Image (cartoon, rainbow, N blue to C red):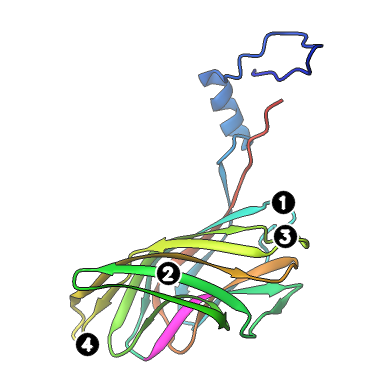
Amino acid sequence: MAYLGTQPNDVKKNTGLYTPSEILQLTKEGSWGGSLELIAEQTTSGAVSYNFQSIKENIYDVHFLQISGLTVPAGSQSWGIRFFESEVLETASVYLYAYQENGINNAYENNSTSESYIKFNNTGSEQWVANMYVYFYNLGNSSKYSFCSFQGMPERKTSGGSYNDAGTYMRFGGGVLPQASVVDGIQIYNSATTSTGGTAKLYGVKQIWVT
């Protein structure tokens, strides 16, 4: 296995390379950097917001959230992310976010320095379906701010249930809770309407250690 010695007392040659068999073994053990551990999974149907409150923030400094087919009926609403700090949901207007959107007929950006959540999307008279992923950083570190970055492909539907091509677009951005604290939970927040379908999976991202 790759070895990093301490100059000038190296005891064997350091190639800095892993063989395929070593990578396979580390992957099986769950020790290979970039491996994912599924922490929790929820069906995003039948509620307005969804909470992940056992996120292993003391183990992982990077988390990955995958949202698939999140379906919400028509209604004036916004959705995004909120954090729990020591099991208390932060709902004050302390979050910062920014995102860009590129669609068939438009492109624009949205941002705020005083919002009650990290905003992903909003809609009005049409229902929508969202597929996206989110990375979270530093959630369990009491001396750092908690950040996230996201990218997704929301699609809007007409009242008749057909896809609205003009409402299909790509969105990417990020946000931060600008206060140093231990974040021990994540909420997928919706301001108004109960969702009718989809899944959300939260993973921990493993680090690579060279020994």
Disc marking residue 1: none
Identity of the residue drawn at 75% across and 55% down: 58
Q: In terms of secondary structure, where does tag 3 sit?
A: loop
Q: Earlier in the sequence, mark 4 or mark 2?
A: 2
Identity of the residue drawn at 67% across and 58% down: 138
Q: Amino acid at mark 4?
A: Ser
Disc marking residue 140: 3
Q: Which image quadrant: the N terminus?
A: top right
User: Label 3 neighbourhood size at 10 Å, few (<14), some (14-19), many (20+)?
Assistant: many
Residue 159 falls in image quadrant: bottom left
Q: Disc 1 vs disc 2: Cβ atoms closer than 8 Å? A: no
Q: Amino acid at mark 3?
A: Gly
Q: Is residue 12 above or below residue 142?
A: above
Q: In terms of secondary structure, where does tag 2 sit?
A: strand
Q: Disc 3 vs disc 2: Cβ atoms closer than 8 Å? A: no
Q: Position of residue 29 (x, y in %)?
A: 63, 34
User: Label 4 neighbourhood size at 10 Å, few (<14), some (14-19), many (20+)?
Assistant: few
Residues at marks 1 and 3, CA–CA distance in whole angstroms:
8 Å
Q: In terms of secondary structure, where does tag 1 sit?
A: loop
Identity of the residue drawn at 59% across and 77% down: 95
User: Label 1 neighbourhood size at 10 Å, few (<14), some (14-19), many (20+)?
Assistant: few
Disc marking residue 59: 1
What residue is disc 2 on?
99
Q: Amino acid at mark 2?
A: Tyr
- Any part of residue 99 in sight: yes
Nearer the camera: disc 4 or disc 2: 2
